[in-house]
Image (cartoon, rainbow, N blue to C red):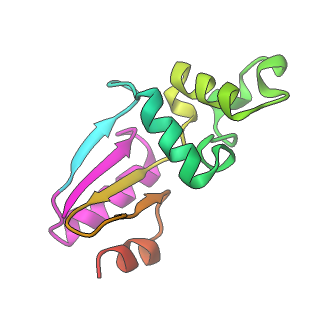
Amino acid sequence: MTVAMFGIKNCDTVKKARTWLEGRGIAYTFHDYKSQGITRAHLAAWCQEFGWEKVLNRAGTTFKKLPEADRENLTEAKAIALMLANPSMIKRPMLELSGPQPGAPRLLGFTPQAYEAAFK
């Protein structure tokens, strides 16, 4: 199984997820979308699977500091454009699992229970 984590290296939740994986000896690649960016294709796939409302991090300071006009009347297209321009607004971490089984899961956010279930 190949594991790829997308997030921001200084995020506390990302740090918890990385510690969880490393503590179990699970190898993974890390993509810091704040420094490396993210593609529209990735965001579109994540929004299709989880809904843009869950992928967009409205609780963070980056979103809250946006002008009111940018925060109003959000659509998926507008949310993706905002996340491309401001990757800090993407919920994190996003874990993509791939392997021999079709439809390998993605995990949005981190809970030990969700990770335990995914790595049984």
Q: In terms of depth relative to the viewer, which is nearer, 29 or 14? A: 29
Q: Residue at x 71, y 23 (%)?
A: 65
Please report the residue visible at 77 percent of the width from the left and 20 percent of the height from the top. Answer: 70
Q: Quadrant of the C terminus?
A: bottom left
**Residue positioned 38% across, 59% down in the render:** 16
Q: Is residue 10 left or right of residue 25?
A: right
Residue at the location (63% across, 41% down)? 57
Q: Is residue 25 left or right of residue 90?
A: left
Q: Where 84 falls versus 91 (above or below)?
A: above
Residue 34 percent across, percent down from the top left:
41, 28
Classify the position of the N terminus by image quarter: bottom left
Residue 110 vertical placement versus 49 (above, below): below
Q: Is residue 26 left or right of residue 15?
A: left
Q: For the magenta stretch, what is the residue range?
A: 1-27
Q: Nearer the viewer, residue 70 or 52?
A: 52
**Residue 99 x, y percent position in the rendering:** 21, 63
Q: How many marks on residues?
A: 0
Residue 80 shown left or right of residue 24 in the figure: right
Query: Looking at the picture, how far across and down is residue 110, in whole percent?
Result: 46, 62
Work out whether residue 98 or residue 17 is closer to the camera in this orientation and state it. Answer: 98
Residue 69 picture quarter: top right
Whether residue 18 is in magenta: the answer is yes
Residue 92: % across, % down: 48, 47
Residue extending furthest bottom?
Answer: 120
Work out which residue is located at the far front of the displayed protein and give it.
102
Q: Quadrant of residue 89?
A: top right
